[in-house]
Each structure stands twice: as C-alpha cells, then as structure tokens.
Image (cartoon, rainbow, N blue to C red):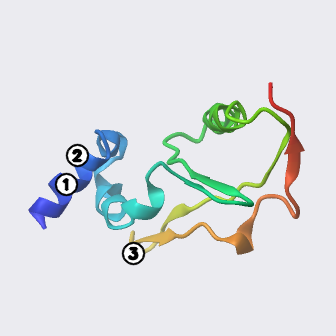
Amino acid sequence: KQWYQRRVAITAGGTLLRVPDEYRTIYQRHWTTIKTSVRQGRIKDVYHFPLFTADDSEITEKVEEVIRKYDDAVKINVVFGFILKNRITNDLKFYHPSNNSMLFNSPRLLASP
C-alpha cells in the first residue's frame, strides 16, 4: 500500500499534496477518474479536471483553457464528480461523474475568445 500511495503522489505531480489529509485516501483510490486527463474522439473530446476550491473562477478558468484550443465555436456540457461525506459516520464515498448528471439538458454553444 505504501508503494501505491507514493506512486500516486508522484503521478499526480504533487497535486495530491493540495488535498486535505482526511480526503487523501479516497482521492488516491479514485485518482484514475479524478486526475487531469483528455480523451479526444472523432465526435467529442472529454476533459477531466480536479477542482480544489469552491470558487467558480476555477471552473471558468478551466472552461476558457479548453475553448482556447478550438478555432471555431464548440458545444460543451459539464458534469461533476463529488466526494460525499456522511454526517453521522464521517464515511467518504466518491460519486462518479456520469452522463446521467449533466449540468445542462443539452450542450451549450460557446465561441472561442
């Protein structure tokens, strides 16, 4: 287990150091889903970004970063994954991002800046 934790911390480029201690284990367990990644496809591209604040400026920054990569207008939709904490037991559970929980009913058209 120690080897796995060390490997995840190195892979994360120190990102896990920003995670509070009580959440670090669940982040490590689900890091393949949480970590920054891009999957480019023929019809759609999928971007994953971990967010470390509740500040919406972090979300805005990530959206702007993505749309700058495209020359034309793009359609986007957003889905969030969450770490849920039971108020009574303090157990933590990872809620996976899913196509069933999109922010918008249909993708929104955004023009490149």
Disc 3 versus disc 2: nearer the observer: 2
Residue 95 occupies which quadrant of the picture?
bottom right
SS at badge 1? helix
- Amino acid of disc 2: Ile
Which residue is found at the position 75% from the left and 64% from the top? 102
The residue singled out by tag 2 in the image is 10
Residue 6 percent across, percent down from the top left:
16, 53
Give the CA separation, mark 1 to mark 3: 29 Å
The residue singled out by tag 3 in the image is 89
- Of mark 3 and mark 2, the one earlier in the sequence is 2
Disc 1 versus disc 3: nearer the observer: 1
Q: Are marks 1 and 2 in contact (CB under 8 Å)?
A: yes
SS at badge 2? helix
SS at badge 3? loop
Residue 44 percent across, percent down from the top left:
72, 58
Give the CA separation, mark 1 to mark 2: 5 Å
Mark 3 Cα within 10 Å, few/some/many (few <14, many 20+)? few
Residue 79 - label: none
Residue 7 percent across, percent down from the top left:
19, 54
Q: The C terminus appears in which quarter of the rendering?
A: top right
The residue singled out by tag 1 in the image is 7
Q: Are marks 3 and 2 in contact (CB under 8 Å)?
A: no
- Of mark 1 and mark 3, the one earlier in the sequence is 1
- Amino acid of disc 1: Arg
